[in-house]
Image (tube, grey):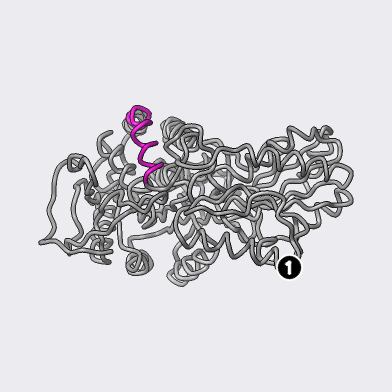
C-alpha cells in the first residue's frame, strides 16, 4: 500500500526508532531523505504479515538524483589514497560487527531469516569488508612487453564509474554487501535499488553503516520504491549515461530483461542468478553424513537460497537407506518463528512463494510422485518436503521451487548422474558425497557448475572466494575476482626514444 504525505524532508541522521513501526528515509548524496513525492510503502513481516517498516516510495526522479550524486562523487573517490579507503572499510566492518544482534532481529522481522543464517550473513559481510580493506592496495595493472625496443607499455585498470546494484531479499544482508563492496573497492560509486521485499536489510542498513563509517557523500546511495515502480527506477539506470554497469542478483527471467536493456545501451552487466543445484550421493558414502549434508543444503533458510540443493541423485544400492535417513532428519528439523534461535525452517517470504511451492508439489503428485515426508503448509511455513518418483520433465525437476522441497532420485552410476546434472540449464553450485575423494574430484571436474564441492554442502560461501554461476546461473564472480568485473583495462605507452615514423 502506498500513502502520500506533505512532502520531502532531510535529516542528518536516520530518524529515531519507533516503538511500533519504524519509518525510514532513503540515502542520497550523504543525506537521509524522503521520496520527492513524499510517498511511502510498507515492508511486511513474512511470518504474520504485520508491518515491519515504512520506507520511501521513490520515482525515477529520485533515482536520477542518486545517479547524479554518485557521478559527482566518483572522481574524488577513485583518487582517494588506498590507506584512507582501507580505514573506511575497516571502520565499516567494526560498526557492522557491533550491530549483529540488531541487524539479525531485522532480518527475522523483514525476511523471515532464522538466527543461524542471519549470523552467517553478518559474519560473512564483516569478513568481506575486511578483505576489501586490502583489495584497495591490489596492483592496478601490469607491465607489458612491446615489440618496439624503446617503448614501455602498461595495462592499467580503471574503475567503470557509477554501478547500479539490484539487491534481492533472500540473502538480503550478505547479497547487499556483496553488491556494494567490490565496486567501491575498485573505485566506483554505487546506487542500490533493494528489493521491495527487503528495503531495510537489503539496502538502508548498508547505507547506515557506510555513512557512519565516513564514506564520502555520494559514494553509496540507496533508493527504495513501491513494487509497481521498480521498472521506472530501472529505466533510469538503463537510460542514464553515467551508469556504466548494472549489477544484478535475482531470477533468470528478470536478468534477461536487465541484460537485454543494458546491452542495448552498451553497458556492462554482472549477473548472479538462480541455480537448480544437484547433489550426487555415491554408494560408498556415509549415509548419516550424506543425509545431514543434503538436509542442510536443501532446507536451510527454508530453501530460499540460490545455492540450495533441489535434486539428489543417489546410487541405487544406497538409495533406500539414504531416503529413510533423510526423512528422519527432515522430520526432526524445528519449524516456526525465525526469532526462536532453535528454528531451522521459518516462513516463506510471501503468499506468491507459498503458492508456488503448493503448485509444484501438487503437480508432482499428479504426475506420479510420492511425498516421502512433508508437503504440508501452515500459513507461510512449509514443512521440509522430500519427493520421490518424480518425472524428469516437470517443473519441480528442472526449475527452482524456492522452498523447502527436494527430490531424491536413484541413478545406476556416476555417468547417469553426471548426465542429469549437465542437462540442467543452470550451473551455480554442485556437491558430490563419497568416501573416494579422488573419484569425487574427478566427478566434480566434469560437472558444468560455477562452484563444485566434494563432501561439502551446496550452500557454501566465503567472502574472498570466486563464487558465481555458468549457463543460466549468470556471469561474473564475487570475492577478489569481482574487481575485474568492475574495472576496465586501459593500454598506455611511454616512448623512451624517438620512434621512426613513416612520414
Against 96, residue 168 (above or below) is: below
Residue 380 falls left or right of residue 72: right
Q: In percent of the image, x 39 and y 55: which residue is there?
A: 197
x and y percentages locating residue 323 in the rendered image: 77, 44
Residue 434 in sight: yes
Q: In percent of the image, x 78 and y 53: which residue is there?
A: 409
Residue 490 in sight: no
User: According to the image, label 1 marks what residue?
Assistant: 367
Residue 143 falls left or right of residue 167: right
When asked about the image quadrant of residue 71, the answer is: bottom left
Instruction: Name the main secondary structure of what is drawn in magenta.
Output: helix
Residue 41 falls left or right of residue 294: left
Seen from this angle, which residue lies furthest left?
A: 6
Residue 10 lies within the magenta run: no
x and y percentages locating residue 411 in the rendered image: 85, 52
Residue 99 lies within the magenta run: yes
Against 261, residue 213 (above or below) is: above
Toward the viewer: 197 or 491? 197
Task: Give the quadrant of the N terminus.
Answer: bottom left
Toward the viewer: 206 or 24? 24
Q: Which residues are magenta?
A: 94-109
x and y percentages locating residue 284 in the rendered image: 86, 36
Task: Identify the secondary structure beneath mark 1.
Answer: loop
Toward the viewer: 443 or 64? 443
Amino acid at each position: 500500500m502506498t500513502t502520500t504525505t506533505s512532502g520531502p524532508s532531510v535529516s542528518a541522521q536516520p530518524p529515531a526508532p519507533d516503538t511500533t513501526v519504524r519509518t525510514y528515509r532513503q540515502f542520497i548524496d550523504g543525506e537521509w531523505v524522503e521520496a520527492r513525492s513524499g510517498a511511502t510503502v510498507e515492508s511486511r513481516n513474512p511470518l504474520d504479515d504485520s508491518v515491519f517498516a515504512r520506507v520511501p516510495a521513490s520515482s525515477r526522479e529520485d533515482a536520477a538524483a542518486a545517479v547524479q550524486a554518485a557521478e559527482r562523487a566518483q572522481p574524488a573517490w577513485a583518487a582517494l589514497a588506498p590507506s584512507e579507503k582501507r580505514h573506511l572499510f575497516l571502520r565499516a566492518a567494526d560498526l557492522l560487527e557491533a550491530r549483529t544482534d540488531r541487524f539479525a532481529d531485522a532480518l527475522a522481522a523483514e525476511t523471515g531469516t532464522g538466527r543461524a543464517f542471519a549470523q552467517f550473513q553478518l559474519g560473512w559481510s564483516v569478513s568481506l569488508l575486511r578483505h576489501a580493506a586490502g583489495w584497495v592496495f591490489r596492483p592496478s595493472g601490469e607491465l607489458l612487453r612491446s615489440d618496439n625496443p624503446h617503448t614501455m607499455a602498461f595495462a592499467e585498470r580503471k574503475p567503470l564509474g557509477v554501478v547500479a546494484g539490484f539487491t534481492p531479499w533472500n540473502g538480503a544482508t550478505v547479497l547487499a554487501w556483496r553488491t556494494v563492496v567490490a565496486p567501491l573497492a575498485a573505485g566506483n560509486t554505487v546506487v542500490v535499488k533493494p528489493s521491495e521485499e527487503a528495503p531495510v536489510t537489503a539496502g538502508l542498513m548498508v547505507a547506515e553503516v557506510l555513512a557512519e563509517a565516513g564514506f564520502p557523500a555520494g559514494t553509496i546511495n540507496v533508493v527504495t520504491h513501491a513494487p509497481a515502480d521498480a521498472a521506472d527506477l530501472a529505466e533510469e539506470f538503463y537510460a542514464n549515461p553515467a551508469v556504466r554497469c548494472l549489477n544484478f542478483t535475482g531470477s533468470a527471467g528478470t536478468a534477461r530483461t536487465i541484460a537485454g536493456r543494458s546491452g542495448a545501451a552498451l553497458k556492462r552487466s554482472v549477473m548472479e542468478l538462480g541455480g537448480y543445484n544437484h547433489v550426487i550421493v555415491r554408494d560408498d558414502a556415509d549415509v548419516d553424513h550424506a543425509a545431514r549434508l543434503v538436509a542442510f543444503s536443501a532446507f536451510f533458510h527454508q530453501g530460499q537460497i540460490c545455492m540450495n540443493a533441489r535434486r539428489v541423485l543417489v546410487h541405487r544400492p544406497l538409495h533406500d537407506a539414504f531416503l529413510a535417513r533423510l526423512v528422519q532428519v527432515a522430520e526432526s528439523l524445528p519449524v516456526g518463528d525465525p526469532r526462536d534461535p532453535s528454528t531451522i525452517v521459518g516462513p516463506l517470504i510471501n503468499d506468491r512463494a507459498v503458492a508456488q511451492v503448493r503448485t509444484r508439489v501438487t503437480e508432482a503428485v499428479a504426475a506420479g510422485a510420492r511425498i516421502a515426508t512433508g508437503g504440508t503448509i501452515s500459513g507461510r511455513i512449509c514443512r521440509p518436503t522430500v519427493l520421490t518418483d518424480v518425472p524428469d520433465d516437470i517443473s519441480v525437476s528442472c526449475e527452482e521451487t524456492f522452498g523447502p522441497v527436494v527430490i531424491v532420485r536413484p541413478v545406476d552410476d556416476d555417468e547417469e548422474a553426471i548426465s542429469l546434472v549437465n542437462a540442467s540449464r543452470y550451473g551455480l553450485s554442485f556437491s558430490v558425497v563419497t568416501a573416494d575423494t579422488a573419484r569425487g574430484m574427478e566427478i566434480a571436474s566434469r560437472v558444468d557448475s560455477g562452484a563444485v564441492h566434494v563432501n561439502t554442502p551446496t550452500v557454501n560461501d566465503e567472502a574472498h572466494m570466486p563464487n558465481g554461476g555458468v549457463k543460466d546461473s549468470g556471469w561474473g564472480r564475487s570475492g577478489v575476482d569481482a574487481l575485474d568485473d568492475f574495472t576496465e583495462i586501459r593500454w598506455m605507452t611511454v616512448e623512451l626514444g624517438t620512434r621512426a615514423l613513416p612520414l
